Amino acid sequence: MIKKVLIMGGAGFIGFNIAKFLQKKTNYHITIADNLSRGKMDSYLSDFISNDNVKFIEGDFTKEDTYKKLGNEYDYFYMLAAVVGVNNTLKIPGEVIRINTSLILHTLEWLKKGNAKNVVFTSTSENYAGTIDHFGYQIPTPEEVPLSIVDISHPRYTYAVTKILGESGFLNYAKSYGFNCTVVRYHNVYGPVGTYDGGREKAPAALCRKIALSKLNNIKDIEVWGDGNQTRSFMYITDCLEGTQKLFNSELSEPYNVGSDEQVSINQMIEMIEEIADYKVER
């Protein structure tokens, strides 16, 4: 029996990779919904949606009427649509709040009228920022610790604010309207982009590019934000997909971290890339 899957935000990095992962399975029909806000459709996406079991719906889903394009006959639903990125939070914090909140509220109202029984809402490790900084919780951070914001007035945290709202909204709508919702808190996913979403590089890709260009042009200096001692737990996209699918199939309505236990500093990452590139840089 064919299962119908809707991936909202499916033209972005993680959403597109989820779509590709599911498309290879013969019992899924994939619908991607996206507003193409990152630019025009590129060859990766146009080639992908030419598959018989893939459909693409373009629209501005901050507007309630746009949801009429979707219908409501889906078995599974992935919610990945959001404005993300530090630059966006600093430059257009009001739009981050408006767009992400509108997407969450309209999607929830659409979900309660539909047939989807298994839902994933994608959240973020940034929800823990205040908890770790002010309460001393250790990394890796258990899902049960409180979520908190360092400075509610600072634009940097507008993205995390909307994700905390989304977690509460999706989990409580799931209880009220009879569908399963798993919240996945992603931790620094990286890998080949494969769509026009390439303007939002993760640290591994950005540092590889900087060091490669430095070697090509015989330049020693590269720009590194911070002192290089800050750590991250990076997760490759294939591990992200495997973790997401295991949680999705579990039908458990609660939040889960999807990431790696291993912490790597930016300086350590630079040293690893230098060894591979056989080129030393200054920072």
Image: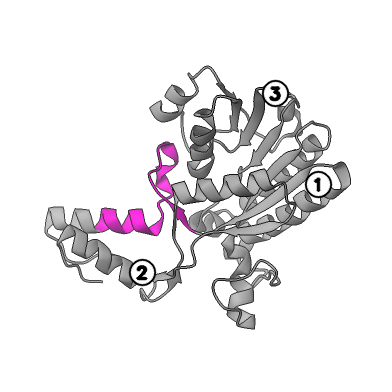
Kindly identify which numbered label has been placed on residue 266. Answer: 2
Crowdedness near tag 2: few (<14), some (14–19) or many (≥20) residues, C-alpha within 10 Å: many
* Residue 196 sits inside the magenta stretch: yes
Q: What amino acid type should be assigned to the residue bearing mark 2?
A: Ile
Q: Amino acid at mark 3?
A: Lys
Mark 1 lies on residue: 174
Secondary structure at numbered mark 2: helix
Q: Indicate whether 181 appears above or below 278.
A: above
On the image, the x and y values in percent for residue 175 come to 85, 49
Eye-nearest disc, 1 or 2: 1
Measure the alpha-carbon separation of dots 1 and 3: 23 Å
SS class of the residue under badge 3? helix
Q: Pick the residue in front: 94 or 151.
A: 151
Disc with the residue nearer the chain's start (1 vs 2): 1
Mark 3: few, some, or many residues within 10 Å (few <14, many ≥20)?
few
Q: Residue at x 63, y 60 (%)?
A: 160
Q: Please provide percent x and percent y for residue 255.
A: 69, 58
Q: Whole-Å distance between the Cαs marked 3 and 2?
A: 44 Å
Q: The residue tagged with tag 1: helix, strand or loop? A: helix
State the residue lying farthest toward the right.
176
Q: Can you identify the residue that label 3 sits on?
A: 69
Q: Position of residue 137 (x, y in %)?
A: 61, 79
On whether residue 73 falls in the magenta region, the answer is no
Q: Position of residue 114 (x, y in %)?
A: 80, 31
Q: Are marks 1 and 3 in contact (CB under 8 Å)?
A: no
